[in-house]
């Protein structure tokens, strides 16, 4: 089961990890991020600091570390004590180069320098197992000689951005993330934040089915059958592990895939509704508006809100004449 899950994760990673920003944090400052719809992955190229997700405790990070922050959670990077100032990322951004934006806390001195990517839901399939990760994670690679070279290459790319910097950075990011996933999935560490939601193979079978085939006619009974459990035992255990009922989970998966399809394709709403498992456009539109606050057609017209926020930020920055010095 572990190897199977790793294979599925790597498939989703191959198409969904996107480099989008460089972060410069001056000593004594904090850089704060509002919640993203995508999972955020920070790569520490230089300096030390700490991560805090929501109102949680600060967790220290070192150079050549990978930081994974779950989707839809605010977080902050920088100094946990003796703070000179804090900056919201969206209020201090500019164009960095070749498709990357720059976020800054302080005067721009890169005492701590990170390059950041996002793993988002694809518009042509399920959300992927990354969506189940609920806890932040920090993995250091300071003693890993091969990956030290990878971090050095990332640093060189963002220090002098040129044609192809974004593509090259994404490739290097994926290399680090694949190594990290291998360690967690093949190392037998059942306390890993990456595995807590999937420690029970029976539940994992049902969850994988929904993520990969969201349009199927699921019920609590059919999901319990996939898991090889009784209906009652499955429903109770699913709620304990995932914090929601099985059908609530199915609906959330379907609606988020539909939201992506609305903003990324020209498919008719009726076709999208059918593809994610709704019997009629009317039923789909009613549930969608209740969840997202807009009918599907209006959601498409407005660009989907936070679902496309990185692209929107990027386009706004490109319209500005501001530039940023090299790190």
Image (spheres, rainbow, N blue to C red):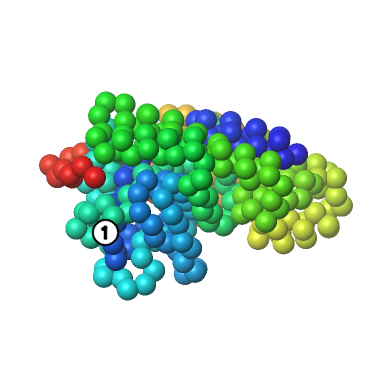
Q: Residue at x 77, y 46 (%)?
A: 201
Left or right, residue 254 beside residue 163? right
Q: Residue 178 occupies which quadrant of the picture?
A: top right
For the N terminus, give its image quadrant. top right
Q: Residue 214 at what x, y percent from top left?
A: 64, 38
The residue lying toward the viewer, choosing from 307 and 179, is 179
Query: Would you say residue 185 is visible in this rendering?
Result: yes
Place of residue 155 in the rendered image (x, y in percent of width and height, measured from the top left): 33, 39
Mark 1 falls on what kind of element?
A: loop
Q: Position of residue 52 (x, y in %)?
A: 45, 63
Residue under the image location 57 percent in, 47 percent down: 131
Identify whether 116 is placed above or below 136: above
Instruction: Residue at 68% x, 44% y: name it.
Output: 187
Looking at the rendering, in which quadrant would you find the C terminus?
top left
Instruction: Choose top left, top right, bottom left or bottom right for residue 204.
Output: top right
The residue located at (83%, 57%) in the rendering is 233
Instruction: Kindly tell me whether residue 245 is visible in this rendering.
Output: no
| Residue for badge 1 | 26
In the rendered image, residue 170, in percent from the top left (x then y), is placed at: 41, 33
| Foreground residue among 222 and 206 | 206
Seen in the picture, residue 151 relative to 29 is either above or below; the reply is: above
Q: Is residue 193 left or right of residue 258?
A: right
In the image, residue 225 above or below residue 55: above
Question: Residue 65 vs residue 203: left or right?
Answer: left
Judging depth in this view, the residue of 154 and 215 nearest the camera is: 154
């Amino acid at each position: 089961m572990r190897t199977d899950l790793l294979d599925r994760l790597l498939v989703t990673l191959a198409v969904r990890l996107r480099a989008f920003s460089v972060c410069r944090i001056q000593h004594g400052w904090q850089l704060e991020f509002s919640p993203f719809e995508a999972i955020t992955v920070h790569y520490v190229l230089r300096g030390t600091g700490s991560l805090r997700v929501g109102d949680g405790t600060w967790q220290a990070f070192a150079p050549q570390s990978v930081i994974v922050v779950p989707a839809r959670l605010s977080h902050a990077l920088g100094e946990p004590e003796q703070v000179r100032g804090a900056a919201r990322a969206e209020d201090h951004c500019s164009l960095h180069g070749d498709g990357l934006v720059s976020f800054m806390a302080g005067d721009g001195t890169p005492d701590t320098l990170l390059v950041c990517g996002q793993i988002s839901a694809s518009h042509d399939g399920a959300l992927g197992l990354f969506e189940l990760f609920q806890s932040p994670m920090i993995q250091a690679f300071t003693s890993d000689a091969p990956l030290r070279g990878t971090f050095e290459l990332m640093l060189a790319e963002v220090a002098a951005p040129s044609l192809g910097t974004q593509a090259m950075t994404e490739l290097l990011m994926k290399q680090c993330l694949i190594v990290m996933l291998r360690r967690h999935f093949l190392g037998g560490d059942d306390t890993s934040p990456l595995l807590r939601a999937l420690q029970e193979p029976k539940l994992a079978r049902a969850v994988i089915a929904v993520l990969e085939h969201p349009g199927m006619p699921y019920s609590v009974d059919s999901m319990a059958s996939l898991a090889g459990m009784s209906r009652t035992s499955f429903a109770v255990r699913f709620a304990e592990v995932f914090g929601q009922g099985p059908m609530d989970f199915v609906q959330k998966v379907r609606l988020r895939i539909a939201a992506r399809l609305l903003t990324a394709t020209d498919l008719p709403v009726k076709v999208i509704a059918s593809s994610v498992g709704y019997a009629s456009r009317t039923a789909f539109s009613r549930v969608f508006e209740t969840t997202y606050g807009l009918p599907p057609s209006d959601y498409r017209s407005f660009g989907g809100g936070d679902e496309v926020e990185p692209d929107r930020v990027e386009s706004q920055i490109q319209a500005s004449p501001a530039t940023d010095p090299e790190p």
